[in-house]
Image: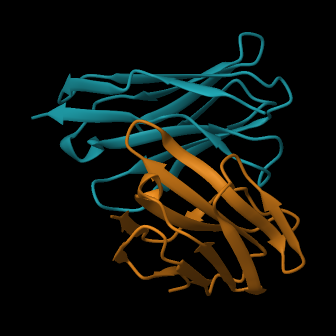
């Protein structure tokens, strides 16, 4: 099956700085890559996703990039704010809705 | 608002007991999932169901069973709970009719402690 690795496991940044979280996947057939944010004590929620037919997608301060050749994808958060503090999970699947394989999560802390 | 509801939210039980976690959804989605979350291990898929007559094992199905009683209900059972099944369990749904994204909608989670 698919293996998704996520780094780093913890990340601290100063407010206003950028944060980057990286994931790699093993199955070249994977073609859908969502990112979920889980605030403390809350349920995970989708923040952005990308399909394999595009290389980059942006939504305000967050962006995701995908390198299919290298089988890695990254989440970029610019101008970080304290409310960005959360655990972020990457995931990969073959087509939307099949088995989602999640990374182990990155705990992001934004220091005011 | 349409939602995914899990019961119970917290449960403490003893080794060897049978436990059922229930999930119901009012989103009208066809697909339902059970995930387990452990610190440092992320979210791991236990079972998933694409419709009432379709049940599939996930990454870590051993020691668990499920029942899809209706499109809106998906239950997870631990026939004989053991301490390493202590975890936070999430139910999730998604909708894969034409034109719908693959977004997972999670319930609020059920924290299970097995003593």
Q: State left or right for residue A73 relative to residue A26.
A: left
- Image point 38% across, 77% down: which residue? B9
**Would residue B10 be seen by someone viewing this image from the given angle?**
yes
Residue A37 pos. (x, y %): 43, 48
Residue B109 pos. (x, y %): 43, 68
**Would residue A59 be seen by someone viewing this image from the given angle?**
no
Q: State left or right for residue A46 relative to residue A76.
A: right
Query: Residue placed farthest to the top in the image?
Result: A70
Quadrant that contains the C terminus of chain B: bottom left
Q: Is residue A46 above or below residue B31?
A: above
Query: Residue placed farthest to the front in the image?
Result: B16
Q: Is residue A28 above or below residue B8?
A: above
Quadrant of res A50: top right
Residue B103 pos. (x, y %): 65, 57
- Image point 56% across, 44% down: which residue? A48
Quadrant of res A40: bottom left
Is residue A59 or residue B36 the one in the foreground? B36
Is residue A96 or residue A9 the one in the foreground? A9
Is residue B75 or residue A5 the one in the foreground? B75
The colour with which the image depicts chain A is: cyan
Quadrant of res B88: bottom left
Color style of the picture: by chain
Residue A90 pos. (x, y %): 55, 36
**Number of numbered discs:** 0
Q: Is residue B11 above or below residue A94?
A: below
The colour with which the image depicts chain B is: orange
Q: State left or right for residue A89 relative to residue A95.
A: left
- Image point 74% across, 63% down: which residue? B48
């Amino acid at each position: 099956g698919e293996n998704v690795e996520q780094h780093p496991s913890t990340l601290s940044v100063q407010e206003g700085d950028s944060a980057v979280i990286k994931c790699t996947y093993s199955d070249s057939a994977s073609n859908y890559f969502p990112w979920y944010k889980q605030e403390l004590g809350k349920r995970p929620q989708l923040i952005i996703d990308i399909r394999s037919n595009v290389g980059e997608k942006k939504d305000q301060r967050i962006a995701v990039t995908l390198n299919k050749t290298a089988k890695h994808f990254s989440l970029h958060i610019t101008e970080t704010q304290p409310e960005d503090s959360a655990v972020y999970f990457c995931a990969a699947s073959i087509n939307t809705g099949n088995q989602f394989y999640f990374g182990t999560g990155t705990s992001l802390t934004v220091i005011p | 608002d349409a939602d995914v509801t899990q019961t119970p939210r917290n449960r403490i039980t003893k080794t060897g007991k049978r436990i059922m976690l229930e999930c119901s959804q009012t989103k009208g989605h066809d697909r339902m999932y059970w995930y387990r979350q452990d610190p440092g291990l992320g979210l791991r898929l236990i079972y998933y169901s694409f419709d009432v007559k379709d049940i599939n094992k996930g990454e870590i199905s051993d020691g668990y069973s499920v029942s899809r009683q209706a499109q809106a209900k998906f239950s997870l059972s631990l026939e004989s709970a053991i301490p390493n099944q202590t975890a936070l369990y999430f139910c999730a749904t998604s909708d894969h009719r034409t034109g719908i994204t693959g977004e997972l909608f999670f319930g609020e989670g059920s924290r299970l402690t097995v003593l």
